[in-house]
Image (cartoon, helix red, strand yellow):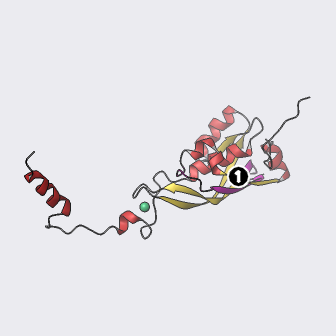
Amino acid sequence: MATRTTDAGAHGRFDAFELSAEGGKLAGELDARTLPRAADHLAAGADAAPIAWRITGGRDAAARPLLTVRLDGAVPLVCQRCLQPFVAPVAQTTDLLLARDEAELARLDVEETEVVLANATLDPRNLVEDELLLSLPLSPRHGEEECAAARRPMADDGKLSPFAGLAALKGRNPD
Ligand SMILES: [Zn+2]
């Protein structure tokens, strides 16, 4: 029999229905830069992007099996206003209803916002990556006080800018 190997220190795949029935918990920590889909959204550089995660099995009010995925951490993003990197906190809790098959997934998807197909074992890293991607802002921005673009002084109206003056000087040079 082949030995299944997993990332050092990481949890392997797990049975979501079993975790739900047991009310079990899985937890770990990872660097969001090692998640291929999430890494594309992070600011370039070597800053760490630590995410502590916790997956708890349980049931919703209607006794349907679910997983609660909790993420806590911080990731470097690029402000779309001033194009400078900044560190954005991640604090996300999501309840994911479990679907036994495609048909149940389709049915629950209409009624509920968050459903995961759990007919096979799940990889915690995939769940964490999915939830992280959903928690990232579509257009990341600094807060108003921290953003360099927001602090930039307004140009004085009606005055010739130094660049316009320079252009005028250059224009006089015969070539
Ligand atoms: Zn900014």
Q: Amino acid at mark 1?
A: Leu
Residue farthest toward the right in the current orientation of the protein? 1
84, above or below 107, in the image:
below
Disc 1 crowd rating (10 Å Cα; few below 14, some 14-19, many 20+) is some
Q: Nearer the viewer, residue 104 or 158?
A: 158
The image shows residue 130 at horizontal and vertical percentages of: 63, 45
**Looking at the image, which residue is at 54% across and 50% down?**
42
Location of residue 3 (image quadrant): top right
27, above or below 6, in the image:
below
Q: Which residue is mark 1?
A: 30
Q: Quadrant of ligand 1?
A: bottom left
Q: Is 122 covered by the magenta stretch?
A: no
Location of residue 168 (image quadrant): bottom left
Q: Is residue 122 left or right of residue 90?
A: right
Q: Which residues are magenta?
A: 42-67
- What is the quadrant of the N terminus in the image? top right
Q: Is residue 75 left or right of residue 56?
A: left
The image shows residue 10 at horizontal and vertical percentages of: 78, 48
Q: Is residue 101 left or right of residue 24?
A: left
The mark tally for this picture is: 1
The image shows residue 38 at horizontal and vertical percentages of: 59, 46
